[in-house]
Image: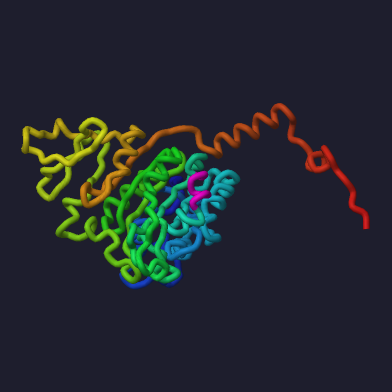
């Protein structure tokens, strides 16, 4: 932000639209944290764009006092890709949900991740289709009874973190709607990353899937069910900070510090640059393991728009600027007569 630019606050990023989510929805918290973080990023509002698909989360652009696109179901990554390539100076954010992003939009999601377009993707995961009133989603657990699975879903659920890592995303993280400070920090880290950043946000739908992440959010259980990932630090968790993760062969296990001679030096030290460790952590599921929160993996490689610009420059240097009429009339052409 230049010296002449005014100092922005959260209020500058709040639009004049009435927020139309169900009372108590986790989306309110996510919106609040994004609006709080935006002024700290130093990007003028006219250079910020939020792109969404369809779903409860996809109302997000209406509530941000920035530019925005409310696109079609699952196609937000495609719109965001075109925008970022043509306007690389913009800060582009994709807001999607577990249904929008992993079902009809699954193909678009994996390709924006592998291409490493410099956009930030926030995927709200409440394990249900909320906008259409409670059908099971790609992340719903097996046996989930919903309006579209009255005797229980038989589908194995998707793991959004595993999908992002499998697509070779260069920044993969997870946060949760009710952990305000952690969510703010994660959003900042995503913004600072050069390349596609993917953040799964565990989120509650108190109307159609209340308690979706209860063990991770309830005051009485969360300390034993959350693992805060910190780069370069051992993986310690628990109400008394006496539990940790250690590697035994090719398996991760929970160990109690002080029992059987276990010390912090025996625990896994988090390395967010280690892709294999990221895959190990993504596979951890309750109740046997805590839910990891934080950055699973970060790495750097050229962005899609950088490679695209370099390719165009190379082609121009070799072939010249070209003429549109020449392009349209080369090769096999024909004339249609009335």
Left or right: 235, with 188 as reference point: left
Q: Where is residue 192 in the image (x, y as percent from the top left)?
A: 40, 42
- Residue at left 32%, top 56%? 202
Residue at far top of view? 318
Viewer can see residue 307: yes
Q: How many marks?
A: 0
Residue at far right of view? 338
Query: For residue 312, which quarter of the picture?
Result: top right
Report the span colored magenta.
106-112
Magenta-colored segment: predominant secondary structure:
helix
- Residue at left 32%, top 43%? 282
Seen in the picture, residue 55 relative to 46 is either above or below; the reply is below
Q: Is 191 in front, or is 212?
A: 212
Q: Is 280 in front, or is 11?
A: 280
What colour scheme was applied to this rendering of the protein?
A: rainbow
Magenta stretch holds residue 194? no
Query: For residue 204, which quarter of the picture?
Result: bottom left
Seen in the picture, residue 194 relative to 37 is either above or below; the reply is above
- Residue at left 26%, top 32%? 250
Q: Where is residue 261 in the image (x, y as percent from the top left)?
A: 6, 32
Q: Where is residue 110 in the image (x, y as percent from the top left)?
A: 48, 45
Seen in the picture, residue 111 relative to 336 is either above or below; the reply is above
Left or right: 82, with 323 as reference point: left
Say which quadrant the C terminus sits in: bottom right
Q: Is 213 in front, or is 83?
A: 213
- Residue at left 57%, top 46%? 87
């Amino acid at each position: 932000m230049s010296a002449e630019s005014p100092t922005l606050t959260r209020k500058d990023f709040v639009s004049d639209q009435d927020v139309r989510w169900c009372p108590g929805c986790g989306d309110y918290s996510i919106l609040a944290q994004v609006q709080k973080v935006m002024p700290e990023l130093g990007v003028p509002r006219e250079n910020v764009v939020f792109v969404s698909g369809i779903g409860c989360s996809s109302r997000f652009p209406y509530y941000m006092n920035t530019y925005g696109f409310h696109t079609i179901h699952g196609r937000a990554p495609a719109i965001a890709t075109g925008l970022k390539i043509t306007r690389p100076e913009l800060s582009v954010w994709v807001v999607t949900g577990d249904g929008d992003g992993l079902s009809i939009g699954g193909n678009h999601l994996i390709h924006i991740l592998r291409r490493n377009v410099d956009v930030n993707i926030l995927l709200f995961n409440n394990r249900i289709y909320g906008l259409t009133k409670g059908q099971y989603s790609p992340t719903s657990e097996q046996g989930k009874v919903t309006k579209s699975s009255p005797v229980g879903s038989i589908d194995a659920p998707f793991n959004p973190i595993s999908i992002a890592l499998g697509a070779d995303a260069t920044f993969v993280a997870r946060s949760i709607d009710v952990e305000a400070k952690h969510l703010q920090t994660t959003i900042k880290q995503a913004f600072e990353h050069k390349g596609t950043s993917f953040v799964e946000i565990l989120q509650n739908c108190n109307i159609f899937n209340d308690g979706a992440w209860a063990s991770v959010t309830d005051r009485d259980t969360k300390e034993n069910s959350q693992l805060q990932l910190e780069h370069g630090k051992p993986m310690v968790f628990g109400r008394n900070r006496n539990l940790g993760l250690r590697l035994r062969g090719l398996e991760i296990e929970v160990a109690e510090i002080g029992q059987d001679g276990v010390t912090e030096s025996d625990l896994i030290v988090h390395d967010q640059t280690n892709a294999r460790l990221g895959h190990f952590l993504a596979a951890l599921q309750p109740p046997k393991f805590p839910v990891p929160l934080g950055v699973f993996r970060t790495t750097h490689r050229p962005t899609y728009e950088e490679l695209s610009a370099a390719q165009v420059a190379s082609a121009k240097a070799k072939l010249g600027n070209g003429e549109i009429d020449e392009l349209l009339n080369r090769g096999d052409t024909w004339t249609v007569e009335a």
